[in-house]
Image (cartoon, helix red, strand yellow):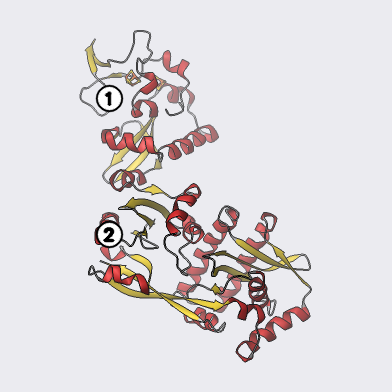
Amino acid sequence: MLKQFVPSDFCLKCQGCCRFARNPGIWAPAGCRLVRKNGEYICANLREDNHCEAYSCHPLDCQLYPFLLVRHGNSLRLGLHRACSFITEHRPQGTALKGYIDYLKERLQTDDIILALQNNPEIAADYRQDVEIIADVSDLLNAGEFGLRQLTIEDKPLVESYLQKNKTNVSSYHFAGIFIWSGLYKIFWTIIQDNLCIFYSDAIGMFMPIPPLGVPPGEETILRCFELMNSRNQNNEISRIENVSETDLKYYEQSGFKAKLKDKEYLCLRDAIAKLSGEAFKHKRASYNHFKKNYKAQVLKYNDSLCQDCLSLYRLWMKERKGKFSDSIYQQMLEDSFVSFETALKFYEKLDLIGYAVKIDGKIRACSFGYALNEETFCVLFEVCDLECKGAAQFIFSEFCQKLSGYKYTNIMGTSDLKNLEKLKLSYRPAEEVALHAIYQ
Ligand code: SF4
Ligand code: SF4
């Protein structure tokens, strides 16, 4: 049952609901029998004393009212019926109204409501008169058709149970690697034939950031994923499955899907970065030593009290990087990455992230964050520093690797096809490259 917005004592004195001018009509609740009486149609559940005979299990549209699900074509919106006597009299606004709308938006995503909508699609109708549109809930349409659910932090155990079946050194095979992009994309999941399928959706369209997780996906699963994405995308070229590694390509190529090399991630030997010894690292070592000699730095394990300082540092670092590299793709990448950085810090503990910050004279001048992909590989997700502080980048990376003893590899992520990033990553002498493909229909 939904919490009611209008107090019941107000409704009991009002005659605005449960009586309808037309039958059939869009205002009558789903599944209710209407009885003709005094020129109007009255719900058979309405008692003489104005109580609802079926109150403990009355239909979803009755529970929602004066809120409505308004369907116009492919969109689904939450509306408020301004003609309701309570709304007309009290004109609710501000936090009380917003709080209830937030509550409704969250409740609409839950299983019982999704099921009720699937069983009674007429609950969502083309309401127009006196209806104020207050929120877009079009995602519920996907839920109905493909069982899509919006990914929340609470879904972490479920996603992890599937990730365990797919051991890999690819950075996106971690709940944090998927979830940190929730500020840029709406993230959905569904189960198709024992595979957990995850989708990113934005104004451009929908794609899968990683292949279906679980058992190796069969052709039917992959086809169903493309069917879902194609139903959302105006251009089917947007529909794709990203981050497919070389070893998994066979499942797709056997079924005639097209693969395109999109990126590669680099795996460094953690111990080599921790030590920075030998000819190969002499420049990095010199920078590290310069930093040690010239700055009195403290290396701190990250905690929430450092959040604002780390965000400010990111902004400074982004400004410095943007000033140095004019490539518009790189500049957009920095902006997007900031959104994911904010999400990562907000959910730091819940995402099992590990982070360190370098403090000099009371100021955070470098920080780095990552997560364990498996017992062999740790992934460094973010590394930002004040570029004025010579050697800070080499220092924090090496220090971080020193603290990660036990891991063989440090994944330093991909380059997004950007030459400046490729040059930087290769300068750490990666031991392995992992080629990543995107799959198209
Ligand atoms: S019109 Fe509004 S106030 Fe009147 S019974 Fe319906 S919900 Fe209650
Ligand atoms: S089910 Fe109850 S609340 Fe809904 S229209 Fe009928 S009497 Fe009114």
Residue with the mark numbered 1 = 28
Could you tell whether 37 is left or right of 180 in the image?
A: left
Of helix, strand and loop, which one carries label 1? Answer: loop
Relative image position of residue 170 (x, y in whole percent): 46, 69
Say which quarter of the image contains residue 88.
Answer: top left
Relative image position of residue 275 (x, y in whole percent): 66, 81
Could you tell whether 220 is left or right of 331 in the image?
A: left
Nearer mark to the viewer, of 1 and 2: 2
Q: Earlier in the sequence, mark 1 or mark 2?
A: 1
Which residue: 46% across, 28% down?
A: 3
**Which is more toward the observer, 408 or 267?**
408
Residue with the mark numbered 2 = 226
**In this view, which residue lies farthest toward the bottom?**
279
Picture quarter with the N terminus: top left
The residue carrying pointer 2 sits among few (fewer than 14), some (14 to 19) or many (20 or more) residues within 10 Å by Cα, namely many
Can you tell which mark lies on residue 424? none
Asked if 45 appears above or below 438 in the picture, the reply is above
Relative image position of residue 197 (x, y in whole percent): 36, 56
Relative image position of residue 364 (x, y in whole percent): 71, 66
Could you tell whether 84 is left or right of 396 in the image?
A: left
Which residue: 42% across, 17% down?
A: 11
Asked if the residue at label 1 sits under 8 Å from ligand 2, the reply is: yes
Which residue: 69% across, 86% down?
A: 286
Residue 342 in view of the camera? yes
Residue type (three-letter) at the residue carrying disc 1: Ala
Q: CA distance from mark 1 to mark 2?
A: 38 Å
Picture quarter with the C terminus: bottom left
**Which is more toward the observer, 297 or 335?**
297
